[in-house]
Structures are given as structure tokens and as C-alpha cells.
Image: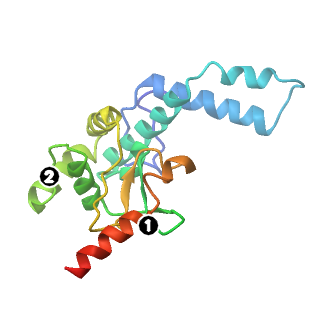
Amino acid sequence: MSANAHTPELTIAPTSVASDVIELIEFCNDVRGDLTHPKTVGHNIYERLFEVEPMSVVNAIATYVASFHEVQGTRYPYWLFGWNYLNPRPNTHEIILINDQQFLHSLAALGFDIPSYDYARAEAWKEKYMASVDGYAVVRDALRSSNRCEPKFDRFPFQPKLCRRWWTAEHHKTCGCVTEESLARARKFDDV
């Protein structure tokens, strides 16, 4: 498959995905085929996996998905960056999908200069950064530079927060789980 190849049923125009991205996706698909339908005996199939840096696969898939949305003229979802919202509840957590406007508010809370409260500017920002491969790369790199999740506010202990390590149960203790202390502080606000 060439860098400009496309399937007419999937896209309305050729995509401009770099050939190395396509080659990595094809390689992963081949390895997947070998793992699910082994034609050899032994562990030599697994040796091929050591050739690939896992994050390069994540980035290749996300770049491909972003290019699909760019060609379709649609916005890609915020979770393409690998971040998700944790919906905190007492003694538990859950992942929750939120709209892209809240994503902009979360980026602003993380310290990025995002026009989240100005509807027209926010829409223009989303069209620039959440509808193209180049925009995806800019936001991806910015999020990679962040060393924390969206901060919590005592007043709103149950507000879902954008989390960079949503898959780690240990991380949920400090990020996605509502503590008794935060609930007590929130209740004090109601007493005022």
C-alpha cells in the first residue's frame, strides 16, 4: 500500500499518510495474523514484536485515524491522544466520554493557552488542531510535555478529569478516585 493509497469506501479522497506509518501498520497486521493463525512452531513469531517500539505503534494508528478524519472533513476524538476522562466516584472510578468542548477546558486547566470560553475562537481552534494530522501532532506533543493530569478542585470533587494514566489502578488513588477529604472540603462549601 502506498502513502497515497486509499479505499474509496473509507475515504472520499486519497490520504497523505507517510509511508513509514503505513509500513508499520502493515507490519503489525502481519504479526497479528501470525499470532492468531500461527504457521510455525515455537516463539519466533514473538521475536518480531521486539523490533517495534510500542509507542510508535500507538502513534502510527493515531496518525492514521487523524488523517482519515482530515480527509473526511471531520474532527477526531480527543481520546486519540491516549488521554481519557476519569469519572470519580467514592471508592471507584470509571472512564467517561466527554465532548470536545470540555476537552478544551481541560487543556486550559492544564495550563495551555486555549480559547475554551470563547465559542467562536474555540470552534476555530478545534478546526485547526482537531481536524488535521498536523494539528494532531501539535496537541500530541504538547500533551506529552505535561507531567500531570487535569487538576482537581475541592468545590467539584465529582467532576470528571482528563487523565494521562487512566489505565493504572494505583494512579486512580490520586487522580480518579474521590477521597473522603475532598468530599469533606466540598461539604464545607455547602455549609457557607
| Residue, disc 1 | 180
Horizontally, is 189 left or right of 149 in the view? left
Horizontally, is 35 left or right of 72 in the view? right
Is the C-beta separation of discs 1 and 2 under 8 Å? no
Instruction: Name the foreground residue: 70 vs 48.
Output: 48
Task: Give the image's coloring scheme.
Answer: rainbow
Instruction: Name the foreground residue: 124 vs 81.
Output: 81
Is residue 168 among the parts visible in the rendering? Answer: no
Q: Quadrant of residue 13?
A: top left
Amino acid under disc 2: Ala
Instruction: Identify which residue is drawn at 83% across, 33% down.
Output: 38
Q: Which mark is residue 124?
A: 2
Considering every residue shown, the one lying at the far bottom of the view is: 191
Horizontally, is 145 left or right of 167 in the view? left
- Element type at mark 2: helix
Of the 4 image quadrants, the one containing the C terminus is bottom left
Horizontally, is 187 left or right of 83 in the view? left
Residue 119 position within the rendered picture, expressed as x and y whole percent measured from the top left: 12, 62
Instruction: Name the foreground residue: 151 vs 128.
Output: 151
Which-is-in-front pick, marks 1 and 2? 1
Amino acid under disc 1: Glu
Instruction: Identify which residue is drawn at 54% across, 64% down.
Output: 92
Instruction: Identify which residue is drawn at 28% across, 47% down.
Output: 131
Around disc 2, counting alpha carbons within 10 Å, would you say few (fewer than 14), some (14 to 19), or many (20 or more)? few
Q: How many marks?
A: 2
Q: Is residue 22 above or below residue 8?
A: above
Residue 117 position within the rendered picture, expressed as x and y whole percent measured from the top left: 12, 60
Is residue 92 among the parts visible in the rendering? Answer: yes
Residue 124 position within the rendered picture, expressed as x and y whole percent measured from the top left: 14, 52
Residue 42 position within the rendered picture, expressed as x and y whole percent measured from the top left: 88, 24
Looking at the image, is mark 1 or mark 2 earlier in the sequence?
Answer: 2
Instruction: Name the foreground residue: 183 vs 51.
Output: 183
